Amino acid sequence: MSTRSRPLSPHLQIYRLPLLAIMSITHRVTGVALVAGLFVLAWWLGCAAAGPESFAFAQDLVGSWIGRLALFGWSVALFFHLGHGVRHLLWETGWGFDLPDAYASAYVSLGVTAGLTVAAWGAALLF
């Protein structure tokens, strides 16, 4: 038997994931990030209940630049998960299964994420 030279199957260095696959993966990752953020929130509240010294330590950590960066990331994850969750609810009604509608709702979800994040941080900086 002669052997034919066959192409290798695509891998991640060649294959570009479609937007809908990236949105699905990101939805799962943001769910995990939200749970991790809730553990930090529970720790922060526990420190507040433990006393002023413990709360001062927690507040210094959360109020530092890395704490604020983590809080910003957590808020982006929250709004992305919310927007994509609404997208899933629309799918439950039977809307948005066509490929153009799915891509349009993905872009709307990303826009909602950006808009809500900017609005929340803008309101937080005003007050």
Image (cartoon, rainbow, N blue to C red):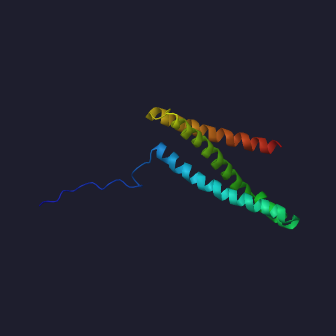
Is any atom of residue 60 visible in this view? no
- The extreme right residue here reads 52
Q: Residue 23: x, y in percent?
A: 52, 45
- Which residue is at 56% across, 54% downward? 29
Q: Is residue 16 left or right of residue 90?
A: left
- The extreme front residue here reads 93
Foreground residue among 92 and 115: 92
Q: Residue 76: x, y in percent?
A: 65, 47
- Which residue is at 79% across, 45% downward? 125
- Which residue is at 59% across, 52% downward? 31
Is any atom of residue 7 visible in this view? yes
- Which residue is at 64% across, 53% downward? 34
Q: How many marks?
A: 0
* Up-down relation of residue 33 to residue 113 (above or below): below
Q: On the rendered image, what quadrant is the C terminus found in?
A: top right
Q: On the rendered image, what quadrant is the N terminus found in?
A: bottom left
Q: Is residue 73 left or right of residue 29?
A: right
Q: Residue 15: x, y in percent?
A: 40, 50
Q: Is residue 22 left or right of residue 15?
A: right
Q: Is residue 84 left or right of residue 3?
A: right
